[in-house]
Amino acid sequence: MSKSEIALKVNGQSHRLEVFPMARLLDVLREQLQLTGTKEGCGEGECGACTVILDGRIVNSCLVPVAQVNGSAITTIEGVAHHVNAEQLHAVQQSFIDHGGAQCGICTPGMVLAAVDLLERNPQPTEADIRTALAGNLCRCTGYMKIFESVVQACK
């Protein structure tokens, strides 16, 4: 299979890339764009470690062929702070630091992006809303309570 050119905007920056159309978005982000904050956990769309925001919706980047994102806008964990100010972390990121929501770091980018997506759609979520929003992300370290508390605090 030959490579094709795609255009996309990642974290507000335009890119033109030569890619194999069936390459995973996850691999293109990590290998071609050097955005290694997006993690591979399971490679099957089950764990949420590879979560990115694609055209305003969260997706598992390990399941998305890069050919499907031609012309799209993508936000990775590296671009979250830029929504506020490049020098200041997003409230969710800061809350994860302040309240111990991050441990090993594999699930953290996906958890943060899921929480950011939730708060952009619903600035005053209920506890049930938060649990539902984070349900697609698995963590093996924290037992979820510190993650959940971090998102609750970020809402304030």
Image (tube, grey):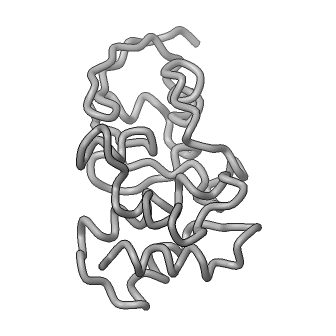
Number of numbered discs: 0
Q: Is residue 16 left or right of residue 143?
A: left
Which residue ends up furthest to the right in the rendered image? 140
Residue 99 screen position, x and y as percent: 54, 72
Tell me if residue 90 can be seen: yes
- Residue 51 in the image, given as x and y percentages of width and height: 50, 52
Relative placement, left or right, of 41 versus 151 is right
Task: Tell me what residue is drawn at x 43 percent, y 42 percent.
Answer: 76
Position in image of residue 63 (x %, y %): 56, 46
- Residue 27's place in the image compared with 151, above or below, is above
Q: Nearer the viewer, residue 92 or 138?
A: 92
- Which residue is at a point 54% across and 28% down the rendered structure image? 22
Q: Quadrant of residue 57?
A: bottom left
Residue occupying image coordinates x 56% and y 33%: 24
User: Which is more toward the observer, 4 or 100?
Assistant: 100
Assign the N terminus to one quadrant of the image. top right
Establish if 22 lies above or below 87: above
Give above or below for 60 relative to 2. below
* Residue at x-position 40% and y-position 56%: 58
Asked whether residue 54 is in view, the answer is: no
Quarter in which the C terminus is drawn: bottom left
Q: Where residue 88 sits: x, y (%)?
A: 32, 47
- Left or right: 83 with respect to 29? left
Nearer to me, 93 or 144: 93
